[in-house]
Image: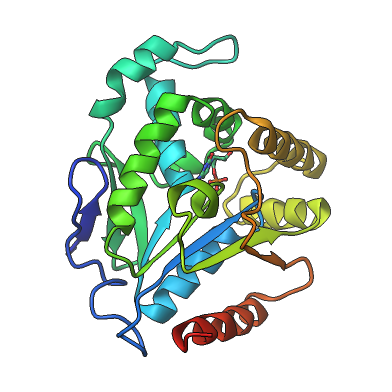
Amino acid sequence: MKILHYEVSTKTNYLSPPYGGLGGKNMDKKLIIAIDGYSSCGKSTFARLIAKELNYIFIDSGAMYRTVTLFCMRRKYINITGLNTAGIISELKDIHIDFVFNPDRNEYETFLNSENVEKEIRSMEVTSFVSRISQMPEVRARMVELQRQIGGSKGIVMDGRDIGTVVFPDADIKIFMTASIDIRAKRRHTELKSRGVNIDFEEIKRTIIARDIADENRDISPLRRADDAIILDNSRMTVDEQMVWIKEIIDKKRNGS
Ligand code: DC
């Protein structure tokens, strides 16, 4: 299998990612597009599709926080009772995260120190610990540094919680996504079921609410809408409708309005 990949660990450049490079229809104006919002709103699906449409790079910044969390779990730096912050800080620089293109799936997959962890970082266990890891200032500082390195050359769509507020405050387009709790829980439930994970709907809802509270109330880079972000409530929108909506915004931006 031929793998094209770019690293976010030590290097500032990436190697010909299939979504990047020569650009889409209007090659002249490359944009930074920041997609922030609540968990389970479909941010990554949306961001990934926009990147494909434009031939841009897509970065799922949540995957980076999840990967650090997995690393900490394996090292036993985090469990239900506690957090070994000194241990985490001492090893932060040794955590290498790669996004590697898998042509069979036509998607990027996340690698931790050369191991494919794409599936593992989506587990309920990682999900339950990630808020605590992503609250650590040292972890955030390192992730933001890496995210800025990747976005330095424009032509990128990045989704997360603080992309439009902290990582790229000058992003060309900022979207803030939201949807009703019930709809988000339903989508997550369907997604988990399709992956063979059987979990109670109410439990999913509780986890989503808890993550919203953690995301919105942490001291550093809490989830909030940037003043210049456009709100997208996709509770009653299909993915196709969202794409029509964003294309209009992109076209306007490219035409200078
Ligand atoms: O998007 P996600 O659910 O995969 O993100 C996982 C966690 O990472 C989420 O609980 C919040 C955190 N996160 C963050 O703090 N900042 C980001 N830019 C992206 C995610």
Percent coordinates x, y for residue 254 in the rendering: 45, 84
Residue occupying image coordinates x 58% and y 86%: 248
Classify residue 93 by image quadrant. Answer: top left
Asked whether the viewer can see residue 22, the reply is yes
Q: Quadrant of the C terminus?
A: bottom right
Query: Which quadrant contains ligand 1?
Result: top right
Percent coordinates x, y for residue 211 in the rendering: 68, 37
- Is 27 located above or below residue 103 in the figure? below
| Scheme of image coloration | rainbow
* Left or right of 85 on screen, residue 201: right
Residue occupying image coordinates x 41% and y 75%: 52
Q: Quadrant of the N terminus?
A: bottom left
* Front-most of residues 182 and 233: 233
Asked whether the viewer can see residue 70, the reply is no
* Front-most of residues 189 and 132: 132
Residue occupying image coordinates x 29% and y 58%: 152
Instruction: Count up the numbered dots.
Output: 0
Percent coordinates x, y for residue 232 in the rendering: 69, 67
Percent coordinates x, y for residue 55 in the rendering: 34, 77
Residue occupying image coordinates x 55% and y 10%: 82
Classify residue 115 by image quadrant. Answer: top left
* Left or right of 168 on screen, residue 199: right
* Left or right of 23 on screen, residue 236: right
